[in-house]
Amino acid sequence: VQLVESGGGLVQAGGSLRLSCAASGRTYVMGWFRQAPGKEREFVALISRSGSSTLYADSVKGRFTISRDNAENTVYLQMTSLKPDDAAVYYCAAGPSFDGSPRAFASWGQGTQVTVSS
């Protein structure tokens, strides 16, 4: 499966961004992860194939919303109340299991940069 992210950019703290991930092929469990310089890749959000189940990292719960449009084969990450700590390269990933571990995902996008100014 091929994944292409878009929607990153520069935003002021407190602002919002919406990331998109266009996927080809079958419908998979989809996840968003992020990696800041010098840090490990970390889980952000997860959504089931149907979109009926979601899971969030504690650090983004209540601020970020993951959703999907299976007709368009696209997954979204709506990010609000952004903080400087949210700055990272954001990756979408596709996998077979509802599992937030990066090891559960075989397909990854190229990433999109999110920068949050204070």
Image: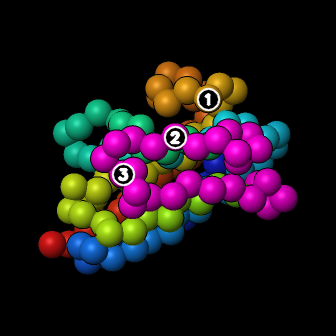
Task: From the top left corner, tell me how far across and down residue 90 is, in percent.
Answer: 42, 52
Q: Residue at x 49, y 30 (%)?
A: 100
Q: Which residue is mark 3?
A: 60
Q: Is residue 29 left or right of residue 63?
A: right
Position of the N terminus by quadrant: top right
Secondary element under disc 2, as helix, strand or loop, is strand
Q: Residue furthest top?
A: 103
Q: Residues within 10 Å of mark 2 (few under 14, many from 20)?
A: some
Q: Earlier in the sequence, mark 2 or mark 3?
A: 2
Task: From the top left corner, tell me how far across and down residue 75 is, in percent.
Answer: 64, 55
Position of the C terminus by quadrant: bottom left
Q: Which residues are magenta?
A: 48-73
The quarter holding residue 79 reads: bottom left
Nearest the eye: 81 or 70: 81
Q: For the residues labelled 2 and 3, say whether their Cβ atoms are less than 8 Å apart.
A: no
Q: Is residue 75 above or below residue 47?
A: below
Q: Which residue is mark 1?
A: 98
- Residue type at mark 3 is Val
Q: Residues within 10 Å of mark 3 (few under 14, many from 20)?
A: some
Q: For the residues labelled 1 and 2, say whether their Cβ atoms are less than 8 Å apart.
A: yes
Q: Residues within 10 Å of mark 1 (few under 14, many from 20)?
A: some
- Residue type at mark 2 is Leu
Q: Is residue 99 left or right of residue 33?
A: right
Q: Which residue is mark 2?
A: 55
Q: Earlier in the sequence, mark 1 or mark 2?
A: 2
Q: Earlier in the sequence, mark 1 or mark 3?
A: 3
